[in-house]
Image (cartoon, rainbow, N blue to C red):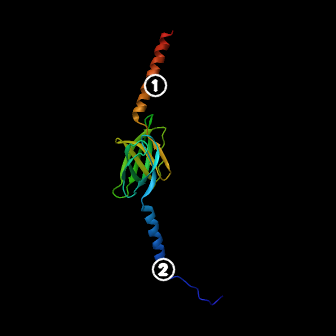
Amino acid sequence: MSDKPVAREPEDAKTARTDEVRQESSRVSERDSQYPIVCPKCHVQAFQEMPLRLASHAYTCPRCNTAFATHVFHIRASRSRSSGIYQRRYTVHLKPAAGKEQELTFSTPKRLRIAFNAKDLVGFTYLNNKLTVVQNFTLRKYWVIQQESFYVWLLIFAAAAILIVFYYGSHAQ
């Protein structure tokens, strides 16, 4: 073994350096940054400033000039269940950057499956006070929620088509 002294860093210096790294990394995560926000009208993604310490953000689409609001939260828990033949009902527990936990319940067409995981950063975009787009920034995906009136008209059209087929089918004999 060699008798040369080994230079060691004092424990206080190691702790101080580790604290500096933690503070620096927390500053990076709290920094305002740009996220691709989806316009609820023309469905174009445009990078917009999104301060994460605020829950609600007002935006204007650079393409169609539509004003809309996006509410950003972290997911604490979520569940979904089938609600009738054509709908899926979601209940999501949300953690805003500041304030109390909130619960959001909404319905989508049954074929639309929205993916939520705990701690995901998500955005709920509203146009004229109706939920139109759900974005999961963590998974880098978004889902456009169709208006319910579309499905009502589809159901009416299908019922009318069936009645017409039966009417002409019974008179053809």
Residue 4: % across, % down: 62, 89
Residue 93 sits above or below residue 171 on the image: below
The residue shown at (46%, 76%) is: 16
Label 2, label 1: how many angstroms apart (C-alpha)? 74 Å
Residue closest to the eye, 110 or 149: 149
Q: Amino acid at mark 2?
A: Ala
Considering every residue shown, the one lying at the far right of the view is 1
Q: Amino acid at mark 1?
A: Ala
| Closer to the camera in the image, 41 or 120 | 41
Q: Nearer the viewer, residue 18 or 166?
A: 18
Tell me which corner region of the image, top left, top right, bottom left or bottom right, holds residue 68. top left
Q: Which residue is mark 1?
A: 158
Q: Which badge, 2 or 1, comes first in the chain's sequence? A: 2
The N terminus, quarter of image: bottom right
- Can you say whether 29 is above or below 80 in the image? below
Q: Position of residue 77 (x, y in %)?
A: 43, 52
> Furthest-top residue in view?
173
* Image spot of residue 56 (x, y percent): 36, 52
Question: Which circle marks residue 13 in the picture?
Answer: 2
Q: Secondary structure at mark 1?
A: helix
